[in-house]
Structure formats: C-alpha cells, structure tokens
C-alpha cells in the first residue's frame, strides 16, 4: 500500500556529535602512549629501586611496547617470579611480574647480606620474600600513578584511576591472570644494577585497561577481575562438591628474625588470639569470625562475610 503523502517527523531527529559516537582508542593509538609512559616510569623506578639495591640507582630502560597474549607471558616469565594482579579503577586487571632472582637478592641485602640469591632458586618464595614483594607492590603502584600523572596524552580532565594490588602467586600458571585468547599490551622495563645480566619488570594488561589508565572510554573488552568466564552457581554441580581448603588465621604474629634464628625446643611464645579471625581461601579473605566452641570442639562463628572476593 502506497501512502498518499510523505511522513514528516514531529521534531528534528537527534544529531549526535562524532565525539559521543566514537569508541575509545584502539591499540594503534594507545601503544605510543604506553611507550611514553614507559620512559617516565623507567626514570621513576630507577630512583625507587635505589634504596633496595644498596643506595645506587640502577640503569632502567623501557623496551618498545607491543601486543601479546598469555602465551607471550609464559614464554618470557620463569616458573618462579613475583607475579601480581592489580585492580585499575576498581576492577580492570593489570599484571606486573618481577624476576625472582633480584627479589631474593634484595631480601638478602635487607637482612644484612651481600645481596646474593640462593643457587638454585627455591621452588617458592620464603616468607621474608613475600613481605618484600608486598612492599614492592606498593612501590610499583605508587610510581605508576605518578608516571601517569606526568604523561602527556591523557584524556583532558580525567583523574588517574586507583591502582591497587589484589593478589599474587609465584607461579604464573596458578595465578592465571587473563584468558588464553585475550589481546594484551605488554611493556618491559630492563633493570641493570651491576649484576651479571639485566633483569626485567613486566607490565601486561588488556587494551581496555590501557585505555582506562589514560582516561579514555574502553576501546575493547575489559574483563573484570575474577570474571573472566561466565559465572556458575556454587550450589550446582560440579561446583557444589568441589573441596576447597579454608584457613582460619587464629594467630598472626610478628617475631624478630633473631628470635626465629635462635628458637629451640621448649621455648614458649606468648600469643593472643585475634578478636576477628579471618577465613581465607588462598590469599582471599572471604569472611571473619570469632573463636568459640561447639560440642567440645573449637569453632568459628561468622560475624562478617565479604561479597565478590573469590
């Protein structure tokens, strides 16, 4: 049926500005910004690492940023490394890895040694190294934020997003920071502290996280931390019968290293049980409780549960 007259709109159709319709920048636009950030980050990290390396600032240079994926990281990161996941702006993942050998040398120097790493390297980090890695995570996040603030090319008026360490694992495969097929932006800092060979600090992130770092709308998919796959219900099979190791941290003490070194059978350590006992799966605290008793057995009564931690 042909209408007898043309239809006329009651009002003018909306005309959207191209800026509103344009998606966030892609890798070709963001990688040059990451290179610029790498140069600033290298200068800041040189000064930041100096106190940990005996006072003399190492030579730090950034390599050319490139695209890669999880297999790229597996090809360059050893079986043992200080691998950490950071949250950018609350939920976008950022991965940072520091080689194990320099971490252990820094720990040795911190305890009065000559800055030597054990040979061969251990299969996992000792507690002293874990504490040092925690200190380095804060240092890495702070200096990345300051380098971002000073990098030209950020979206005008956009604040630097928060960069918060979330979890770590010495084994990259166990950490599983990204899906296998996700495209990543990879930046490497080479650190020459006078040792036999330079060592590396590796930064990797989805392109969407990189866009968020520079204050742009996400140009590609950003997978929120802990949400890289569709969620299943914990009450459904096969998840419902899956055994999970849960740890209740009843006592968390700080003991001088000299005391630990001289400890002998028969020594007594006074302890006080925490009022709020954390319950953990791996490094994630999912609840808190108080110590009590049920049927003549020690029990924990849950007083607080945290959502979205596992």
Image (cartoon, helix red, strand yellow):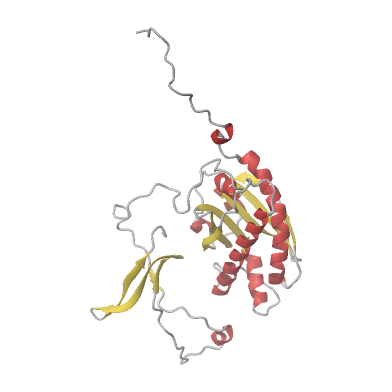
Residue name at image x 47 percent, y 50 percent: 224
Residue 309 percent across, percent down from the top left = 42, 60
Q: With 245 as the anchor, is 97 left or right in this view?
A: right
Residue name at image x 59 percent, y 57 percent: 96
Q: With 280 as the anchor, is 140 left or right in this view?
A: right
Picture quarter with the C terminus: bottom left
In the displayed structure, 5 sits above or below 163; it is above
Q: With 194 as the anchor, is 280 left or right in this view?
A: left
- In the image, farthest residue toward the bottom: 266
Q: How many marks?
A: 0
Residues 75 and 170: in front is: 170
In the displayed structure, 196 sits above or below 254; it is above
Picture quarter with the N terminus: top left
Residue 263 percent across, percent down from the top left = 52, 88
Residue 169 percent across, percent down from the top left = 52, 62
Residue name at image x 30 percent, y 56 percent: 240
Residues 133 and 48: in front is: 48
Indicate the quadrant where residue 246 lies: bottom left
Residues 256 and 86: in front is: 86
- In the image, farthest residue toward the left: 295
Res. 198 visible in picture = no
- In the image, farthest residue toward the front: 10
Indicate the quadrant where residue 203 lies: bottom right
Residue 53 percent across, percent down from the top left = 71, 70
Res. 15 visible in picture = yes
């Amino acid at each position: 049926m042909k209408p007898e007259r043309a239809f006329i709109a009651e009002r003018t159709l909306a005309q959207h500005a191209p800026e509103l319709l344009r998606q966030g920048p892609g890798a070709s636009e963001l990688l040059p910004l990451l290179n610029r950030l790498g140069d600033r980050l290298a200068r800041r990290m040189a000064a930041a690492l100096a106190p940990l390396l005996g006072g003399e600032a190492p030579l730090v240079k950034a390599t050319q940023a490139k695209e890669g994926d999880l297999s790229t990281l597996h090809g360059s990161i050893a079986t043992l490394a200080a691998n950490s996941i950071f949250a950018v702006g609350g939920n976008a993942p950022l991965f940072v890895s520091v080689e194990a050998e320099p971490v252990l040398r820094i720990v040795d120097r911190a305890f009065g040694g000559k800055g030597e790493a054990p040979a061969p390297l251990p299969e996992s980090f000792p507690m002293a190294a874990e504490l040092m890695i925690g200190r380095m995570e804060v240092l890495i996040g702070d200096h990345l934020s300051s380098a971002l603030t000073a990098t030209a090319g950020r979206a005008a008026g956009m604040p630097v997003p928060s960069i918060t360490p979330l979890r770590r694992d010495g084994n990259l495969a166990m950490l599983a920071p990204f899906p296998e097929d996700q495209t990543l932006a990879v930046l490497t800092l080479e650190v020459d502290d006078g040792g036999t060979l330079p060592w590396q600090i590796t930064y990797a992130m989805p392109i969407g996280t990189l866009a968020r770092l520079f204050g742009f709308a996400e140009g590609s998919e950003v997978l929120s931390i802990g949400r890289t796959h569709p969620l299943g219900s914990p009450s459904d099979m096969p998840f419902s019968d899956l055994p999970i190791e849960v740890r209740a941290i009843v006592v968390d003490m700080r003991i001088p290293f000299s005391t630990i070194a001289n400890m002998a059978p028969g020594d007594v350590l006074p302890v006080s049980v925490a009022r709020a006992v954390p319950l953990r799966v791996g490094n994630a605290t999912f609840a808190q409780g108080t110590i009590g008793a049920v049927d003549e057995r020690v029990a924990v009564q849950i007083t607080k549960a945290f959502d979205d931690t596992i």
